Image (cartoon, grey):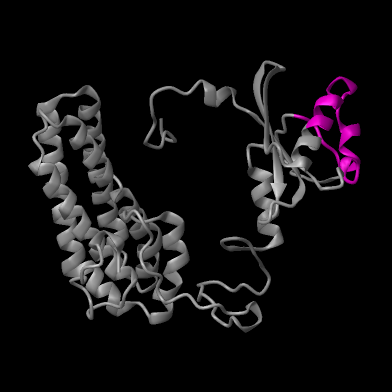
Amino acid sequence: MSEFLNNNTSPFEGQYPDGHPVRTYLEENILIRSLMRELELVNIQDQFELFKEIFKKLEKVELHFARKENQLFPYLEKYGWTSPSENMWAFHDQIREEIKETRKALKAEDLEAILINSQQVFRSLEHIMQVEEGRLLPRAYQMLSEEEWKEFRDGDKEIGWMFEKDPTPYPKVEYIHPSEDTVRKKLPFGIEDKTHYDEGYLTPAQVNSIFRILPVDITYVNENDQVVFYNRGEDRVFPRSAGIIGREVKFCHPPKSVDQVLRILEEFKAGTQDLAEFWIQFKGKFIHIQYFAVRDEDRTYRGVIEMSQDVSHIRGLKGQQRLLDWDA
């Protein structure tokens, strides 16, 4: 049961299993309505800071939306139900804009605008919660298999919840030795020729194609200070050739910069630093250079990634562009 219920019985006890993703969405709706009621009771003129504090909690509805968009909607699409992705997502974005306008009014301390904008947020949230409760979640509960609901937990945790503490795990977490883990997510593509990364599966050819089109120079030096990889893009900032593979990294830099390179390696290996950053003018371009320590999950040092990028165009961007300009 979710912590915000303060150990009282959930209204969904017996209707949905404890910790089930659908139940969590519904219990978040209880929290959303509770926060809206609190805000409506606040005298904003006398309790402005309290209003801001409560509204900040309500802004965490973004996590509720993000889980739907990135977790729930993809599963529904597999069963051919695409209208939530096409329509409800747009309504999420509308509410995001309404929250943004309220946030602007709060920053300006414009009490009239705060009240008008926040009331619009409340109306929109109530409408979308009614759609969730009346159609989206009950239908999804029936549509998805038990195994698919079990797959939700890791992705949900990665995005997060509105609650101060994580909801009860679903299903109850039990240790399974990797050799006995026979659960496999069903995917619409074969994985026999692919490598499994943290999330997703790619063939070597796909990996190579991705590295080739990235607008960033990437060089990987292993824990023995040997260059073992670089991406061969069409417009590299700094030239590279196959002869660099296997070379000790200190010999890949001009003598005047070797001391800096060696210090970076020393600090990375010692675990005292994880990032070194530089920016320079080079051949009329503004170049951003970063060195990242590569580590295992247990923090064991596995080398360094050097990334260089011409950011001249990025630095010159102003305002915003939300539409394609291909036909301009």
Indicate yes or no whether the magenta region holds residue 72: no
* Direction front: furthest residue: 7
Quarter of the image where one finds residue 311? top right
- The answer to whether 172 is drawn above or below residue 33 in the figure is below
Front residue of 230/184: it is 184
Residue 133 relative to residue 69: left or right? left
Quarter of the image where one finds residue 153? bottom left
Span of residues in magenta: 238-263
Quarter of the image where one finds residue 283? top right
Where residue 209 appears, x then y in whole percent? 67, 51
Where residue 261 appears, x then y in whole percent? 81, 30
Indicate yes or no whether the magenta region holds residue 248: yes
Front residue of 297/145: it is 297
- The answer to whether 123 is drawn above or below residue 9 in the figure is above
Q: For the point 86% across and 37% down, which residue is it?
A: 249
The main secondary structure of the magenta stretch is helix
Which quadrant holds the N terminus? Answer: bottom left
